[in-house]
Amino acid sequence: MRLIGDQVKKVAKLANLPLSEEEIVKSSEQLSKILDYVDQLSNVDIKNIEPIFNVVGSSNVMSDDTPRVSLSQDEALKNASQKKNGFFITKGVFEE
Amino acid sequence: MSKYEPVMGLEVHVELNTKSKMFCRCSADYFGEKPNTHTCPVCLGLPGALPYINEKAIEGCMKIGLALGCKVAEVSRFERKNYFYPDLAKGYQISQYRWPLCVRGEMEVVGLEGKRRIRINRAHQEEDTGKLSHIGGVTLIDFNRSGVPLVEIVTEPDFTDTAQVRDYAKKLQQLFRYLGVSNADMERGDMRLEANISVRPVGQKELPPYRVELKNINSFRFMVAAIEYEIKRQIEALERGEKLTQETRGWNEEKKETYLQRSKEEAHDYRYFPEPDLPELRISESEIQRIRESAPELPWKKETRFMSEYGLSESNAKILSESKEMAEFFESSVEDGRKLGVGPRQIANYIINQKPDISVKVAEKIKVMDVGVIGDIGELGRIAEEVISENPDLVESYKKGKVTVIQALVGAAMRKTGGKVDAGKVREILEGKLG
Ligand SMILES: [Zn+2]
């Protein structure tokens, strides 16, 4: 399976990754190889096999509605590259 | 008469009022709290954090679905809806897509041309995003709201006028409050409306090949204004021979017009896939039955019952079933009234006109107002004597042991005085004289 530049650009955009032209070429190669590898699964006969959505295989595991202690504001913001007055800061996006 | 008719569907998001969040147990009570004080690795989207389902939220979603006549799906699953936006901590929202919790319901609404059934496509469970504020060229993020349970209710494109849309949205809000699953406050953002609008030539059966999504509108009034503007804009465009395309638009209240937010070229590609970190849901029949049985009488059912049972007018029945508290107040007053000889319609009128506090004993109030005139024992005694002499048959059956006819004698005293006697006292006096 061969990924072309436009497809890689689209995937990169969806993944919010800025790629240079050089990286796009390189990613096309690598992603195509990954797809080929995964494509081996197409050879398996799965006619009578139910899809598995969850490897644990359990259902209805839920917990009750009792709040627990959250992180402190300082802890929550610890890894933020920019913060101010208790908020995370990111470069401006217009409200949709 | 226009050659075009609107085709409209509604998507309503409602934030559930659970104590904790959807997939972690941070407090969901975020309103007015300091920013980023209700977060944990799950709702901050930190690597390796694992979500777990809040059962109260699932119950809330089912309450809504069942009240809308939906079927609870035998199996339902969560999926990841992938997109990048700063309010979304994980880079995806946990939502439901192919396996929603509640499917295929309906609601009756009233529009310009009377009643119409609106089909509900689904009511599914998802999570809210963080809150952004845009100040001085930067964006501030508060993740306290991130992960608060959200239910999305999607209709089929069945609305044909804005009166129906308004009625539907109002009824949903009323329903959320009756069920006690949300405060459904529009201004606070508990409840949010999105409309899909397109128009087609009258008589055409197929759906139009495009639709315009109206988003982020936080009042019923603005929604109606935006839809009306949009219908007009689209009809005018078609009449000019333009081709309309898929797009998202917002409402500018100052200019009273809709504006383009996102066109088809920028349309999202969400790449939904099943959430591997959460188990699927298989809700048992007994659980569904339990929720069904615990549901309150729905407002529109109450309204018709108030009309048939108490002889109220439609408008009065509507007012008195507006909220569950109001309906309970009315009915407990009717119950009091029964003992005091004050009728439901009198009580309805009093509540609607006087707007008493919910602690007021309405039936007694009315009685004092009406009856206060004849409280005198001597006067009541004379009235009792008259009633006894005028109703020999009743008196005879009373004496033979049919004590229930006392009600009829009390009724006679009420009629005689235009309701201006204290039923309890008259009854006592009558019993004394006959006993
Ligand atoms: Zn959390």
Image: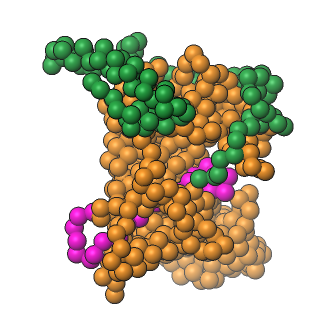
Chain colours: A green, B orange
Confirm whether the magenta stretch covers residue B197.
yes
Residue at screen point 62% across, 22% down: B46
Q: Looking at the image, which is closer to me, B176 or B140?
A: B140
Above or below: residue B75 compared with residue B386: above
Q: Quadrant of the C terminus of chain B?
A: bottom right
Residue at screen point 59% across, 36% down: B88
Q: Which span of residues is magenta-colored?
A: B184-207
Residue B300 seen in render: no
Q: How many marks?
A: 0
Residue A87 seen in render: yes
Residue at screen point 49% across, 26% down: A23
* Residue B184 screen position, x and y as percent: 60, 52
Residue A50 location, quadrant: top left
Q: Looking at the image, which is closer to me, A93 or B60?
A: A93
Residue B143 location, quadrant: top right
* Residue A57 screen position, x and y as percent: 37, 14
* Residue B186 screen position, x and y as percent: 62, 56
Confirm whether the magenta stretch covers residue B358.
no
The residue lying furthest to the right in this view is A85
